[in-house]
Image (cartoon, coloured by chain):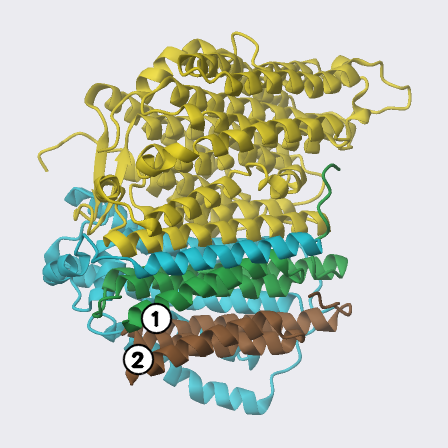
Amino acid sequence: MSPGLIYALAGALLFVLGATGVIVLANLLRKILAFNLLGSGAFLVLVGLAQRDGGTDPLPQAMVLTGIVVAVAATALALALLRRLHRLTGQTRLPDEKEHG
Amino acid sequence: MADVRFDPLPWLILLPLAWAGLSFLLGPGRGARLALAGLSVQLALALLLAAQLLSGGAQIHAVGGWGAPLGIDLLADGLAAVMLLFTQAVALPLAAYARVYFADDPHGRATHAYFWPLLGFLLAAMNALYLSADVFNLYVTLELIGLAAVGLVAAGGGGSQVAAALRYLLVSLVASGAYLLGVALLYGVYGTVSIATLTPLISAQAPLAVGLAAALMAVALMAKTALFPFHFWLPPAHGGAPVPVSALLSALVVKASFYLMLRLWLGLFAPLSVPLAWLPGLLGVAAIVWGSIQAIRARRLKMLVAWSTVAQMGYLFLIFPLLAPHGVALQAGVMQALSHGLAKAAMFTSVGVLLRATQRDSVDALAGAAARLPITLFAFALAGMTLMGLPPSGGFLAKWLLLEAGLRQGQWVWPVAGIIGGLLAAVYVFRVLRQALLLAPPSSQFHPVPRSLEWIAFGLAGASVLLGLRGVEIMALLAVGGRS
Amino acid sequence: MSAFARFATVLLAALFATTLVAAMFNLGAPTVDLPGAVAAQLTHSGVAHPVAAVLLNFRGYDTLLEVAVLLLALLGILGVSHDDGVTTPTPPGEPVLQALARMAVPFMILTAGYLLWVGAHRPGGAFQAGVVLAAAVVLLNLARVLPAWTRPGLLLRLGWVSGFLIFLAVAAALISQGHLLQYPPAWAGALILLIEVGLTISIGLIMSGLFLLLTERQTSP
Amino acid sequence: MTLAFDLLLALTLLWSAWRTLASPDLSRAVVMFIVFGLLMTLAWARLGAADIALAEAAIGAGLTGALLLDALGALKSGAPSKEAP
C-alpha cells in the first residue's frame, strides 16, 4: 500500500462525507463547509490515485491547483450570497421547496 | 502553416472572453453595444464553421500545438457545430432584447450592472464546452457556466431570488464535484483526460472504477440539466431571475449539460451505458408528467414557463433508450433541444412584455392582454405550438423523429410519453391564452412597452415554428464526422 | 428533510463509499504515461518546473479559463452587493496596525516577487504569489492606509482584469503560430513570465477583492 | 514507519472533517475546517506536491478560513441564527 493509495482512499471517504453533508445538513454555512470537504476529497483522489505507484505526476497536481482556485472562488460567491440572504431575511437556511408559486 | 484556411474554433471562445473583460472594464451597466457586435461576429463565425464542416468534415484544433493527450484538443464535429450555431443565433436576439428591457427598467441599474460581462463569460464557457475534447477542461467549463449563471440569477435580487441563486449554486457545485471525482477516477485508471485517447481504452477494458466514474458524471450532468428528481432548483432560479436571464437559462444553459451527457453517453461511455439506458428515459417520463402538472397549477406566469422547462427537459432524455450513433433518436433529441430553446426564448421574452404591461407576475392579471398586445400573444401562442409539437414546428419534427426511432426499435413507450407530454403542454398553454382572451376588467391598466421587445419575441417564436422546415439542413450538419 | 430521507441518504452514501473504496484497490498500472511525456517536452516549454509547464504551457488553456472563474466570482459578489447604498463610516486605522502594515507590506511584496520568480524552476508561481500580494492589500486596507473600496473605480477594475486581458491577448496573438497558445520555444519563457506578472497582480487584487468586498460592505447589520 | 505516519495523517484528516460537520457549535466547526486545511497541507507535502501545499496553506486554509470566520461573525451579529443539525 503506497502513500498515494492511502490518500486516495481518504479522499474518497472525504468526498462521500462532504456530499452527504451538503445534502443532509440544513445550515447553509455547514453546507458550504461540506462542499469544501467534498472538493478536497476529489482533489486527493485525483493526485493520490495517479501517484499510487509512487513518484509524482505534475498533470494532476496542476489540475488540483486549478481546482483549489475554482473552489475558493465558488466559496467566496456562496458566502456572499449567504450573507446577502441573511441580511435580507435573517435566515441561514434555504426556505422549504415550494412546488408552485 | 501549410493550412491557410481561417480557423474559427479558438475565436469562438476568445471573442466572448474579450468582450466580457472589456465590458467589465467599461464599468457597471456598460458594454451592451460591445456585446451585440461581438455576438454578431460570433454568429458569423459559427456559420463559417458550419460551412467548413459541410465541405471538409470535422475539425480539430490542438491548443498549444501539443496535441492530446499532453495538450488539450478542441474538436468541432456536426453536433458541436449545430449547438454553436444555435447558441449564437438565440443569444444575439436575447442580447438585443436585454438591452431594451434593461434600459426601460423601472427598478434602477442594480439588476443589470454586471449583466454584459456575465453574459460574455457565460457564452464563452458554453462555446468552450461544445468544443472541448478533454474531460478535465470540460470540468472547468462546467464551473464557469455554473458561476456565470448563478451570478446572473442573483444580481440585484431580493431574498427569494438570492435563496434561489444559492440553491442553484450548491446543486451546481456538488454536481461539478461529482463530475471531477469521475475525472479523477478516469485519470487514475488510464492516465489521461483526453476523450480521443480514453475512448478506445474504455472499450478495451473498463474496471469497476470506470463504471463509477460514468455513474458520477451522468448523475452530475443530469442534476445540472435539472432532470427529475434533480429538478427542484430550476423553477425558483428560472422563475425568479430577471426575464432576459430566465430566457438565457431556459433556452441555452440547460442544453449545455444535456449536450455533454449526450456526448459522453454516445462516445466515451458507450460500452458501459447500454444496460442502463432505460433509466434516463424513465426519469424523463417522470419529468414530463410532474413538470406539466406543476405548470398547469402555477399561479405565476414566469413559474408556469419555468415548470414547462422541467417538463420539456424530460423529453430530451426520452431518446436515451433509443440512442445509436448517428441514429434517428439523436436527431430527435437535437431537434427537440433546438426547438425548445427557440420556443422557450420566445415564451420568456413575451412573458417579459406581459409582465411589463400588467406590472404583475400573475396568470390572472392577463385578462385583456390579447386585445392590447396581439403580437406578443401571437408569439406566445406560436411558441406554445412548438412545445405541443404541432406541425410544421420544430417540436413536431422532433416528436416525429422520436416516433420513428421508437417504432424502428419496437419501443413505443417513449414516443407515447412524448405525445402525452404535448397534450399536457396544450393544457397550460391554453390556460394562458384563454385568460388573455378574456375581456379586461374596467379597472385594469396596461403600461406601454417598447415595440422592439414584442417583435423580438415574435421573431423567436416564428423561428421555432419554421425550424421544422429547415430540418434537412440541420440533419446534414449533424451527420458530419463523429469523434474517433 | 425527513428522518427517513436522511437515513436513506446516509445508507446510500455508505454503500457508495464501500464500492468506491473497493474499486480503488483493484487497479493495474495506468495505460498512458503522461509524466513521461511532460518530462520529454519540458525543455521546449519555457520553464524548468514540470507543474508550471503544465499550468502555463501544456494546459495553459485551463489556466486561462480558471482566471475567468475568479473574475466571475468577483462579478457575482459585486452584483449582490452593488445597490447597498449603506456605507458604514470607516473607523480610523489603528496606529499599531498602520505601523505594522508599513513594515510588513514591503516584505510581502518581495515575497510575492520571489515566489513569482522561482515559479519557473521550483514550487511557487503566479497563484501563490498572488495570494501573498492579496494578503498585503488586505493588511493595507485593514490599517486604512488605502481608501476603502466602496465603489470600484476604473483603476481598480483595470487592475482586476489586466492579468486576464494580457493572457488573452498573448493567447490570441499566438494563433499566428498555428494554434491557440502555441508558444514559439525561443519566446516561451519570456511570454510566460509576462503572463505570470500580469496574473500575479490581478490575482492579488481579485483575491483581496473577494475578501474586502465581502467584509466591508456587509458588516453593518 | 512512514506508511504508519501516512495512515495516521489520513485518519486525522477524516476525523477533522467529521468534526467540521458534526460539532454542534458553528464556530468550532469553522475552526475545525481550518485545522482540516492545515492537515491537507501536510498531506500534499507527503504526496510530493509542494505547489499544492503552498496553495492549500495560502488559499485553502488561509483565505477560505478568513472568509469563513468573517462570515461567521456577520451571521452571528445579525438575527440569532438557529443552528440546525
Q: Residues within 10 Å of mark 1 (few under 14, many from 20)?
A: many
User: What chain is the cyan one?
Assistant: C
Camera-side residue of D54 and D46: D46
Q: Secondary structure at mark 2?
A: helix
- Residue A61 in view here: yes
Camera-side residue of C149 and C154: C149
User: What chain is the green one?
Assistant: A
Question: Hey, what amino acid is under mark 2?
Answer: Leu
User: What chain is the brown one?
Assistant: D
Q: Residue visible at 64% across and 41% down? A: B241
Q: Residues within 10 Å of mark 2 (few under 14, many from 20)?
A: few
User: What chain is the yellow one?
Assistant: B
Q: Secondary structure at mark 1?
A: helix
* Image quadrant assignment for residue C48: bottom left
Distance from Cα at disc 1 to Cα at disc 2:
9 Å
Question: Hey, what amino acid is under mark 1?
Answer: Ile
Q: Do tag 1 and tag 2 residues touch (Cβ < 8 Å)?
A: yes
